[in-house]
Amino acid sequence: MNDRVQASPAEYFTASDASPAGDAGACPMSPRVAAAISVARYHGVELDPQTVRLQPDEAAPSPPVLVAWLRDSGLWARGVRLSFKQLMKIDDPAPVVLLLDDGGAALLVGRNTEHGALLLRDPHSAGSAPVAADALQLKQLWSGACLLVRAGRQGVAEDAPFDMAMLARLVWGEKRILRDIAISSVTITILSILPILMIMTTINTVVQYHSTNTLTLIVVVLVIALVFEMILTWGRKLLTVILAAKLDARLNLLIFDRLLALPVDFFERNQAGELSYKIAQIYQVREFLTGKLMTTFIDIFMVLLLLPILFYMNASLALTVVIAAGCIGLIIWAFIPMLARMTQRIIAAESAKGSVLVESIYGIRTVKALALEPLRAAEWDRKVANSAALNLEAGQLANWPATLTMPLQRYTQAGVLALGAYMAMHSNNPLMIGSLFGFMMLGGRVAGPLVSLASLIEDVQRAKAAIGQVGSVLNRPTEKRAMTQGLRPQFEGAIRFDEVTFRYEGTSAPALEKMSFSVPAGTMLGLVGRSGSGKSTVTRLLQGINRDYTGSIKIDGTDIREINLRHLRKHFGMVLQDNFLFRGTVRDNILAGRPGLSFEDAVRAARLAGAEEFIELLPHGYDTYIQEGSPNLSGGQKQRLAIARAVVSDPRVLILDEATSALDPESEALVNANLLRIAEGRTMVIVSHRLSSLIECDLIMVLDRGHMVDIGPHKELVERCAIYRHLWLQQNRHIDSRQPIPSLAQRK
Ligand SMILES: Nc1ncnc2c1ncn2[C@@H]1O[C@H](COP(=O)(O)OP(=O)(O)OP(=O)(O)O)[C@@H](O)[C@H]1O
Ligand SMILES: [Mg+2]
């Protein structure tokens, strides 16, 4: 043995070795995750360890999870099994991740061909010297699982449009199952043709020559064939079900992934009802892929196998069957354009109907409050009538090809018999009778699939329309690239706007025009101005919700367009006027599934937000369950929970947009009293209509019609800014502006 291999690799790369990772904070990082990060870094991509989608019961991420994660970031990744020898042969300097049996990982960074050893490195200590391991040593820890990573074409898989071609690739991804289904289908076909051929023989020989032995043999063969056919049919069904489940899961993952990557403003511009209806069309696509398409695919095999047999038995009869089948095809072909148009119309009508339903459910409070039920019902009636009429029309249309092709279908069964009988009568061959029976039975099997091809075409149209619907939502520019790439700086919180001009899509007047200002980190910045003056727009641009502005917005000197979006938003806290609480306990809602946060953090955040006292009065405290739409909480309580949720991760920048406007004076005073404490050590941007809640701000910015009118502390603004003074006097007529204003802290 060579003497260069000293330390046992086992000491280096075990899963228990998971040391706290640099940027994952106190949360230990799996060596597999660390290894993936190292390799990605090698290829120039920085990964965020918090974005791995670990299954809850998974200790170490499985190869598919890692592959999906790497691919998400635009890298090419693949999980493979390789032998020691193969690894020795790879002559690519890029590191390979060895996935060890115990859930650990090692980075393959080089080879020592002289000693027949691989040079491995611990993923947690990037700078450490590699250890050499030979085949024997590695065998104890590793059974061949590897992760190959290469620099990919940026985000190819993710950004491919959602269309037929993409679905075809998705199905093709299951090549092995498809191959097995194909093999079993061919075998089943052969086995099911067997009895027919046997019957032919029975008629031809057994009956004619009274051969009992042959009959027994035939029966035995038939029984055996039947048993095999049963087993194979069962197996094929199972494979089809597996394929369906796999495709279903993939489609669902894909669409949700894409949906979540769409920018917020897309959702704002499109009705939730229509969007969810369109997305739900995916079920049509799936049904098509795994149902009709599958069976037809199998049937075509049957036809391809049977045709040569038919030609062998009787070429002229077989030719007539093919001609009949061709005519069936032509008739159906002629109807396709009409059917396609019809299907488009039906889908549009169904979509309109779906939106009425979803909208009514979403807006049921308003519907009830304004007694709009009759109006909604009338609208629904109209949509239902429309879609019913279209469906009827489509049914009538589809009836035509079915009827017209009927004589041809019949020909392939009965007509062939007549023609064959005629031919038999005029020939001296007695074997003809048996063959004729066989021909008739097989001929029917050819016609069946061809007819089902007809209805397949209709289904293709439906599926196409459904794909179009889903695609109309999903084939939009996503934020994926911005969310997976870009810088991940540590934030201090200094904000700078330089000549920022922004216009919402479809509007003429800019929402912000040539706005320039700069505030240092730790500032408490208030935004005031009339409704529609652009306050919320400022906060939206800061969060990267709208990104097509001109000018530049910088955080600590870095343009936010350069910063990874997810990183940016994660380090920003946001509280809106109306916040959505998820179903789950109070604690879950405050922690919002963010890793590395404990119950103590939740309590601390609740205290900071002034939510502690009411949470403790809830029936189960922090474990009280919040229903959908949170009916068991008051507006003020919800708001304080939302503030707790925003501050729990200790964001560098906290944005409150009208966060306290919906609160009663008492809750508002409570939140305001805490604002100063909340603001400690971070930049705050507070939008409020009530100037009294902004007095404590270091700087207040006054906006008017998208322009910044002035910026300064309250005292200065009252003196010099007319708009501000006007707003202030409007709200505080009873207070003499020359009097010192009681501060929040004093008021408390
Ligand atoms: N999603 C949007 N699409 C198109 N225009 C928008 C959109 N959001 C806002 N606007 C327009 O941009 C301008 C600024 O709106 P913004 O929401 O920033 O005002 P605001 O100061 O926050 O008002 P408010 O106090 O009422 O919340 C308004 O004229 C508004 O009509
Ligand atoms: Mg607003």
Image (cartoon, rainbow, N blue to C red):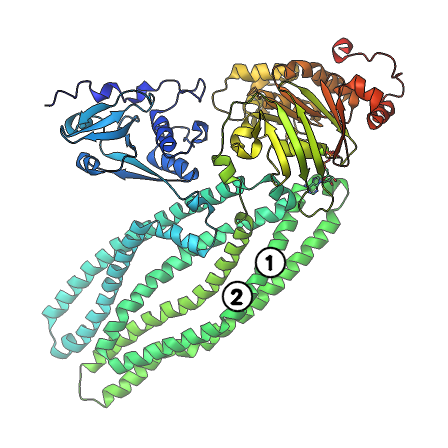
Q: Residues within 10 Å of mark 2 (few under 14, many from 20)?
A: many
| Quadrant where the image shows the N terminus | top left
For label 2, the SS is: helix
Residue 245 appears left or right of 472: left
The one of 680 and 209 positioned closer to us in this rendering: 680
**Residue of label 1:** 348
Could you tell me if residue 577 is visible in this image?
no
- Give the quarter the ligand 2 occupies: top right
Residue shown at 33%/61% (left/top)? 298
Q: Position of residue 687 (x, y in %)?
A: 71, 27
Q: Position of residue 263 (x, y in %)?
A: 57, 40
Picture quadrant where residue 97 is located: top left
Measured Cα–Cα span from mark 1 to mark 2? 12 Å
The one of 257 and 503 positioned closer to us in this rendering: 503
Instruction: Tell me, yes or no, whether the two marked residues, 1 and 2, touch with CB atoms within 8 Å.
Output: no
Image height of 426 relative to 707, above or below = below
Could you tell me if residue 68 is visible in this image?
yes
Residue shown at 63%/50% (left/top)? 355
For label 1, the SS is: helix
Residue shown at 37%/75% (left/top)? 325
The amino acid type found where label 2 is placed reads: Ala
In this view, the residue farthest toward the bottom is 426
**Residue of label 2:** 340
Q: Position of residue 653 (x, y in %)?
A: 61, 23
Q: Position of residue 444 (x, y in %)?
A: 33, 72
**Distance from mark 2 CB to nearest ligand 1 atom below 8 Å:** no
Residue 64 appears left or right of 472: left
First in sequence: mark 1 or mark 2? Answer: 2
Q: Residues within 10 Å of mark 1 (few under 14, many from 20)?
A: some
